[in-house]
Image: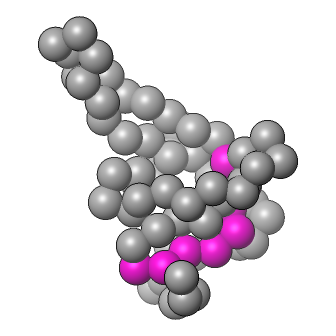
Amino acid sequence: MSDFEIPLGNTPKCGAELHLVRWVRVGGEWRAETLLVTYRAASHDEWLVEQHGQQQSLDRNQWLVFQP
């Protein structure tokens, strides 16, 4: 994964809390699944985040920034 610049104004700061959301099908219904993570970096395809001390890569096509 290589880092890239997100357009100014949309870039979370490294170490900032970030809410992400995706839609999943559960029992025939669509439900929102949300995560509260610590932002580390991003590429065109992935979010690099940390949750409960574990680093994760999340697909940016599935996970969108959510502002509660």
- In the picture, measured across the screen, residue 60 lies left or right of residue 26, that is right
Q: Position of residue 53 (x, y in %)?
A: 83, 48
Span of residues in magenta: 37-44
The front one of 16 and 43 is 43
- In the picture, measured across the screen, residue 29 lies left or right of residue 7, that is left
Majority secondary structure in the magenta region: strand
Q: Residue at x 56, y 60 (%)?
A: 57
Q: Residue furthest left?
A: 28
Where's the N terminus, which quadrant?
bottom right
Q: Position of residue 47 (x, y in %)?
A: 53, 65
Question: How many numbered marks have been drawn onto this rendered protein structure?
Answer: 0
Residue 27, above or below 9: above
- In the picture, measured across the screen, residue 59 lies left or right of residue 48, that is left
- In the picture, measured across the screen, residue 31 lies left or right of residue 64, that is left
Q: Position of residue 67 (x, y in %)?
A: 51, 46
Q: Position of residue 24 (x, y in %)?
A: 30, 30
Q: Residue at x 16, y 13 (%)?
A: 28
Residue 23, above or below 65: above
Q: Residue at x 39, y 62 (%)?
A: 60
Residue 18, above or below 13: above
- Residue 14 in the magenta stretch? The answer is no
Q: Residue furthest right?
A: 53
